Image (cartoon, rainbow, N blue to C red):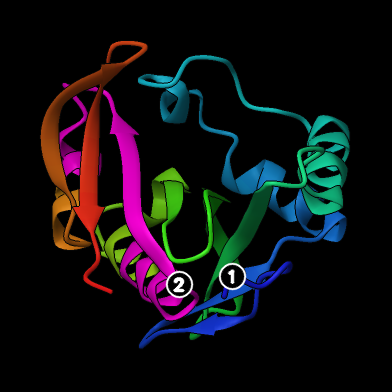
Amino acid sequence: MTPTAPDTIHSQRLVLLPLRVAHADEMAAVLADPQLHAFIGGAPADPQALRVRYARLVAGSPDPAVDWFNWVIRLADEACLVGTVQATVSGPLGERTAEVAWVVGTPWQGRGIATEATRALVGWLQRHGVRTVIAHIHPEHRASAAVAAAAGLAPTDGRHEGEVRWLRVIAG
């Protein structure tokens, strides 16, 4: 069964910590590069805007049939935050579906962090009864496509707001 709050998740090099409003200041610096928004749009948020956003995320979905799970990624050896992973989980028990996303700050990209974090996230979701994992990736975002593939997702013919729908069905 899917819990109502995220657990701390450990992987080889990373600790995925449940998101807290207090992470906003450090995460504003991690996410400050405008290039992070090249495929998703928007602009970097300042610490105050992130505090407001994180407070909303931590409060949880207003829909009781939907669970929001959000983590910050901490690089264990450097004891610093480097990105986020998230999952929006819905559907009936035994058929739960998660839509996942990830972002790693520019200075830490190219080190396999997004792949490791996403694999850890998908493993956590699987252990908590999720049977379908979905990601939406811009068709030109090769790095995110590689992360999705490494986490066992495969591209489909489906599109959502111009992005390719990637899918993994977990045997139950």
Residue appearing at x 64%, y 79% in the figure? 7
Chain part drawn in magenta: 118-145
The residue to which callout 1 is attached is: 2
Residue 133 in the image: state x and y as whole percent. Answer: 34, 52
Place residue 63 in its image quadrant.
Answer: top right
Place residue 171 in its image quadrant.
Answer: bottom left
User: For this rendering, which residue is in front, 89 or 47?
Assistant: 89
Residue appearing at x 52%, y 63% in the figure? 93
Q: Sequence-wise, which precedes: disc 1 or disc 2? A: 1
The residue to which callout 2 is attached is: 129
Residue 112 in the image: state x and y as whole percent. Answer: 25, 64
* Disc 2, SS: loop
Place residue 169 in its image quadrant.
Answer: bottom left
Q: Are marks 1 and 2 in contact (CB under 8 Å)?
A: yes
Residue 96 in the image: state x and y as whole percent. Answer: 46, 57
Q: Amino acid at mark 2?
A: Gly
